[in-house]
């Protein structure tokens, strides 16, 4: 009944929006009524609202795409169809082709590890050595921090490796998805050697600082990323949860229902991509070696691509110039070949069994690939409506409030990233604007850049249409909307504390103690969690 009501509400919202857009188009003179205005953000906002109401991501994203195309085509039926098909879905597939290949190969590697029996061996080892929920959560966190090269790589690797351990300690898949998501983008955003550092460096337009130097100097003020780590550690050590996450954790503890993706949706990831493990030959080493091979090959792929793009320079310059959409597929394909050879030499799999893992890896990633394609298509529609120009104009109007600008930049970046579902797109839009607002001689220049990056991560963290959020759900094999709803209270809590820190950073800059903002944020984070623990216990 609830699903029928949600579908009805979605239908009504869609019809009302189509009617409203048609009226505005007639009265406003065509596409210029929507371009570079708040209307540019309406399609993603509608998609997000529908996803939260209906708990269904596919239709919500598609409705957002159609609304964006309807506006961009001046309410033309054939124009809308063309934009949805070509500039929306087709361009999304072609633009993300490298990442889609990477996802499929990762799925196949996970399937290889499971089929060999290595995952079972790892689960047996973990059950003997990791005794508590706290240990399992901290182990997940540490692994997430260690895999700092790329957020996609982080999400899927940490999920596949840690799921057996967290399952054995009755940690819900929603909590696992949060731990994955909270260490994926945040750690990449403060790691100088990562695909994110390279992306940020490419957006910087500074006469005084190189892209990577500016990225490094901005790290201490990236309050959202750093405070998220403090939040996870403190929350885990205190041993409690709040909001919707608490319900999922209590259900897992009391009933053993971990909230794995519904069988009707994905046949419970086909019992982790392979059905019952046929091979019992796999050992712990057969999980460790493939993961190391995957990491080494992906780093090689990123570096090789980076060095190919520069005439001279070192590792940092190579990472600054690399293209993750090329380097990661290179690395993952080579890793798959080497891992297959390794499995054959170890005689834990036959060649036929290894090749069966390719289509199984693809099938396992179909839900994630579909949502990622739709989310990218929606971003394309938003770009075609001039979202960048609208945000730039709005930011330029706030230049008078210099001390409050870092906090304002953080909020704007949060909202843009949340609405568009992309961190990279957000800091790509805002970094040139922030660079123009803050003088490079001011310490607030680095704070402003950090506020932009932190806000981009925060909005991406909260958004149901974010690729990293989608990958985290896929990595944990958790229902996507369950992940979004349980993560929001935690992400918003850290965002509020980060906002306060940016206010203080602006005020402290006047007396030259901007550095004090981070210790203050750490104290506020720990104090907030102690308060929430007492409140939860009383409830």
Image (spheres, grey):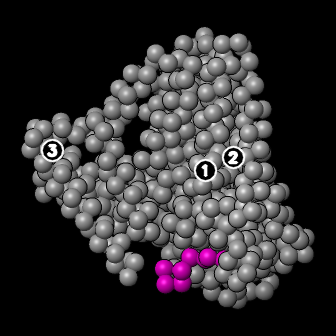
Q: Quadrant of the N terminus?
A: bottom left
289 or 203: nearer the eye? Answer: 203
Q: Residues within 10 Å of mark 1 (few under 14, many from 20)?
A: many
Q: Quadrant of residue 160?
A: bottom right
Task: Kindly identify the residue that appears in the image at 61 percent across and 27 percent down.
Answer: 503
User: What residue is pinned by disc 1?
Assistant: 491
Label 1 SS: helix
Q: Is residue 177 magenta?
A: no
Looking at the picture, how far across and down is residue 505, in whole percent? 65, 24
Q: In the figure, is residue 156 to the left or right of 132?
A: left
Q: Which mark is drawn over residue 35?
A: none
In space, the residues marked 3 and 1 are separated at their CA atoms by 36 Å
In the image, what residue occupies the spot 74% across and 86% down?
279
In the displayed structure, does residue 203 sit left or right of residue 227? Answer: left
Where the C terminus falls, by quadrant?
bottom right
Residue reaching furthest to the front: 538
| In the image: residue 23, left or right of residue 436 | left
The residue that disc 3 covers is 24
Answer with mark 3 or mark 2, whichever residue precedes in sequence.
3
């Amino acid at each position: 009944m609830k699903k029928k009501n949600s579908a009805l509400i979605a239908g009504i919202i869609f019809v009302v929006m189509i009617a409203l857009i048609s009226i505005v188009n007639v009265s406003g003179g065509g596409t210029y009524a929507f371009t570079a205005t708040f209307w540019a953000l309406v399609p993603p906002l509608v998609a997000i609202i529908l996803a939260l109401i209906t708990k269904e991501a596919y239709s919500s994203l598609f409705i957002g795409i159609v609304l964006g195309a309807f506006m961009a085509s001046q309410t033309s039926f054939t124009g809308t169809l063309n934009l949805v098909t070509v500039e929306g879905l087709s361009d999304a597939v072609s633009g993300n082709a490298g990442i889609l290949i990477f996802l499929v190969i990762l799925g196949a590697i996970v399937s290889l590890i499971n089929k060999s029996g290595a995952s079972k061996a790892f689960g047996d080892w973990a059950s003997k050595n990791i005794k508590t929920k706290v240990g399992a959560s901290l182990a997940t966190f540490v692994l997430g921090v260690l895999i700092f090269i790329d957020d996609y790589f982080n999400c899927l690797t940490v999920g596949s490796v840690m799921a057996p351990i967290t399952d054995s300690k009755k940690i819900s898949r929603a909590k696992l998805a949060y731990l994955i998501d909270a260490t994926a983008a945040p750690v990449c955003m403060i790691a100088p050697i990562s695909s994110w550092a390279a992306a940020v460096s490419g957006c910087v337009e500074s006469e005084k600082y190189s892209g990577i130097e500016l990225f490094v100097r901005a790290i201490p003020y990236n309050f959202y990323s750093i405070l998220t780590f403090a939040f996870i550690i403190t929350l885990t050590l205190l041993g409690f949860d709040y909001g919707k996450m608490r319900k999922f954790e209590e259900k897992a503890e009391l009933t053993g229902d971990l909230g794995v993706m519904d069988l009707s949706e994905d046949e419970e990831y086909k019992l982790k991509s392979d059905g019952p493990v046929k091979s019992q030959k796999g050992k712990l080493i057969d999980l460790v070696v493939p993961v190391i091979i995957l990491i080494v090959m992906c780093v090689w792929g990123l570096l090789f691509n980076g060095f190919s793009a520069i005439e001279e320079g070192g590792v940092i310059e190579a990472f600054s110039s690399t293209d993750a959409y090329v380097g990661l597929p290179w690395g993952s394909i080579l890793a798959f070949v080497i891992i297959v050879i390794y499995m054959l030499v170890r005689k834990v799999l036959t060649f036929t069994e290894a090749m069966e893992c390719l289509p199984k890896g693809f099938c396992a990633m179909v839900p994630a690939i579909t949502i990622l394609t739709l989310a990218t298509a929606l971003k394309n529609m938003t770009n075609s409506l001039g979202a960048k120009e609208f945000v730039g104009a709005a930011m330029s109007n706030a230049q008078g409030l210099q001390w409050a600008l870092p906090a304002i930049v953080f909020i704007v970046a949060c909202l843009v990233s949340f609405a568009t579902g992309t961190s990279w797109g957000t800091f790509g839009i805002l970094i040139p604007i922030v660079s123009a607002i803050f003088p490079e001689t001011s310490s607030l220049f680095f704070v402003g850049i950090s506020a932009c990056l932190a806000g981009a991560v925060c909005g991406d963290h909260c958004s149901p249409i974010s690729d990293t959020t989608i990958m985290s759900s896929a990595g944990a094999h958790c229902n996507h909307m369950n992940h979004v709803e349980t993560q929001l209270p935690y992400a918003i809590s850290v965002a509020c504390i980060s906002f306060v820190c940016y206010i203080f950073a602006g005020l402290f800059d006047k007396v030259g103690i901007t550095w004090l903002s981070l210790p203050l944020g750490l104290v506020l984070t720990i104090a907030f969690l102690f308060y929430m623990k007492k409140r939860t216990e009383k409830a």
